[in-house]
Image: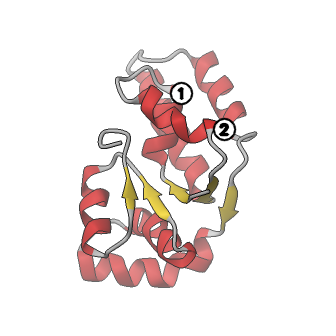
Amino acid sequence: MTRFVLDASITTLWYANEPLSAAASVLLEGEDELHAPDLLFVETANALWKKQLRDEMGAEVVEESLAHLLTVDLVIGKAATLLKSATRLAVAARHPVYDCVYLTLAQEKDAVLATEDKRLLRLAARESVRIWSPGRG
């Protein structure tokens, strides 16, 4: 069993109709331990809302997707407890704090960071955090 920290780029793919959606959904099918900071829900909702604004998703699909996300077996960490180290990393790396929260959680849990965010993938590699991306397998 592998421990993963998921970011919103992954959970958004679960509900979007995009080329990497099926590959990202593999994480839902396994027996792996899935972790995420509590900010995942807000970031995913925002990404789905943007898709609805661009007519890529209907409002009902957005609501159904968020209802499903709330049922996924995730181990939720509090972003507030990660904020100090995430901000320190953000300052050093000149990278957004919210991304660094995911990275810090992955470091804390000795987990694989699952993301499709290219900038976050590069930062995770520089920080020697193991990474998984549906675009890479």
Q: Foreground residue, 13 or 4?
A: 4
Query: Residue tagged by mark 1?
Result: 15
Residue drawn at x 37%, y 70% as measured from the top left = 129
Tell me where residue 17 appears, x and y as whole percent. Answer: 44, 20
For the C terminus, which image quadrant?
A: top left
For the N terminus, which image quadrant?
A: bottom right
At mark 1, the secondary structure is helix
At mark 2, the secondary structure is helix
Query: Is residue 112 shown above or below 28?
Result: below
Query: Is residue 42 shown above or below 67?
Result: below
User: What amino acid type is highlighted by mark number 2?
Assistant: Leu
Residue drawn at x 49%, y 69% as measured from the top left = 106
Classed neighbour count for the residue bearing mark 2: other residues with Cα under 10 Å, few (<14), some (14–19), many (≥20)? some
Tell me where residue 89 appears, x and y as whole percent. Answer: 35, 80
Residue drawn at x 40%, y 69% as measured from the top left = 100
Query: Residue tagged by mark 2?
Result: 69
Q: Foreground residue, 102 or 110?
A: 110
